[in-house]
Amino acid sequence: MREVTKRRWRLLLDVALGAFLAFTVVVGTLETRSYVELAAGLAVVAGSVATARRYPVVSLGIALAGALAVPFPYGDHVPVWVIFVLVAMSYQAGLRMPRARPGILTGVACAVLGLPIALVFGQDGLGDWAAMVAILVFAGLSPWLLGRYVRVRGELARTGWRRAEEMESRQRLVAAQARLRERARIASDMHDSLGHELSLIAVRAAALEVAGGLDDAQRDAAAQLRTSAATATERLREIIGVLREDAAPVEPVQGDLGELLSRARASGLLIESTVDAAGAPPMVARAAYRVVQEALTNVAKHAPGAAVAVRVTSAGARTDVSVVNAPPPAGPLPGAASGHVGLIGLRERVRLVGGTLRAGPRDGGFAVTATLPHGAAPAEPSTDADTATDDEAGQSTSARALELARRDVRRSLVQAVVVPLGLFAMVVAIAGIAFLYQWNSSELPAGVYERLRIGQPRAEIVPELPERERVARPVRGEPPLPPVPGAACEYYGTGRSWLNNDYAAYRLCFAGGRLVAKDRFAEGAP
């Protein structure tokens, strides 16, 4: 159903675009009443719009072929509808073409065919050629490049999203593995400590079995107790021992924080500590031990030489742990950045005792803090905590990378629109400056024109003439050429404002090295 709706919307948009372009053709031909131009324009619109989606190269070729109407005298004007059609179809072709090469070849073919036609057959020659160049560049090439750019950026964004999803999945997998390793470590601790106690029970039961003063029933009960303890020890080893894929922990099962801090100081860490965890339950004490151990490991790894403050306090129904290090004097060690796997496992350890863990930068250093309640149930796992580098972030690393990519797409899209417009403005500015210079340097003063005499030698007149002739001059109202064989005419400005469409020009005609005619004519003159 959704796909059908999309197709209907696409058809509606195509019809609306075709109607608008056809409207521009009709309006552009009302003044000239050129039915040939009207028929050609409607054919170009129909062909280019109908093939735009399935055959964008064909649509681009038809729109470019419409540009060939520029040099032909359809009422002595530039067909505006050509620009509208070419802009719309070039953009859509660039947006929908999977490869750029066919579009480039089509544009080159049209330029190779159309530019000589405009130069040779155009009524204004060089002017028609310049008009076609401007239309092909700004109405054809620029929209096509913009469409290509939008397509490439869209593909890049979609590729980035897929890559980000893969990164998210991989990060979740790493977090899950870290949690499983931490649970396996807990299971290993339980195996070592509980197995030791069960072994002691079996030893005491064996001693009780051979002790004197017991009757047969009591000895039999002691034997059964010894057998059950041995069986439980074996079952515990079989069940929990399977989880111990990694090497067994090297630290004591019931780790002592004092010994841990002493070993850390002996290794070179500068530690200031306050430890009071006498009232903590065994699982909470073990979690506190692991928090301090992992934090000190990270300090030694990522902040060598930094001073560390360790605080472990038990009060009431909870134990608070804080390990804060100052900025490293020489900066962090070079190498790969931390993958935060240790913190993920540590967060799982803390969660299983119902606590919370926070880890993140603080005052140029790093702080790891944990709140461990006594006798609480395991807390619910947090998705943000699994994927973020710290609890304050609230957003995963790949999500932040995606947001930056989206900003880059928007910024680049704005640049793609601004750059062509800036280029167009620069070309117009340069052309305007050149036009003004040529206009002002081709002006013939009225007094000089009045002093000129028919039959005067050209050599006497040349020193008083402007540097160059007037290129932009009235196209109507010019008197007939003088009936003198070999007469050649030159055109100069009268000094009237170029903003006035009804401007005038001076015409000086020479033959045989002498002035044979001088005329002043204006636009619109009979």
Image (tube, rainbow, N blue to C red):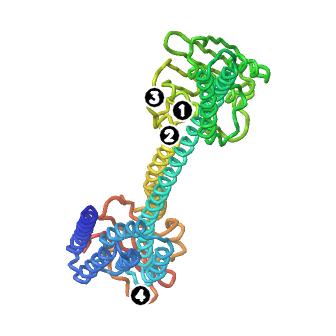
Circles 1 and 3: CB distance less than 8 Å?
Answer: no
- According to the picture, the residue beneath numbered tag 2 turns out to be 396
Residue 348's tag is 1
Amino acid under disc 2: Ser
Provide the secondary structure element on which disc 2 rests. loop
* Residue at image coords 53%, 41%: 397
Work out how far the residue at label 2 is from the one at label 3, CA to CA, in angstroms.
21 Å
Instruction: Specify the farthest residue to the bottom.
Output: 485
* Residue at image coords 60%, 13%: 277
Judged by depth in the image, the label closer to the viewer, 2 or 3, is 3
User: In the drawing, does residue 336 fall left or right of residue 108?
Assistant: right
Provide the secondary structure element on which disc 3 rests. loop
Work out how far the residue at label 2 is from the one at label 4, CA to CA, in angstroms.
88 Å
Q: Which quarter shows the N terminus?
A: bottom left
- According to the picture, the residue beneath numbered tag 3 turns out to be 379
- Mark sitting earlier along the chain (3/4): 3
Work out how far the residue at label 1 is from the one at label 4, CA to CA, in angstroms.
105 Å
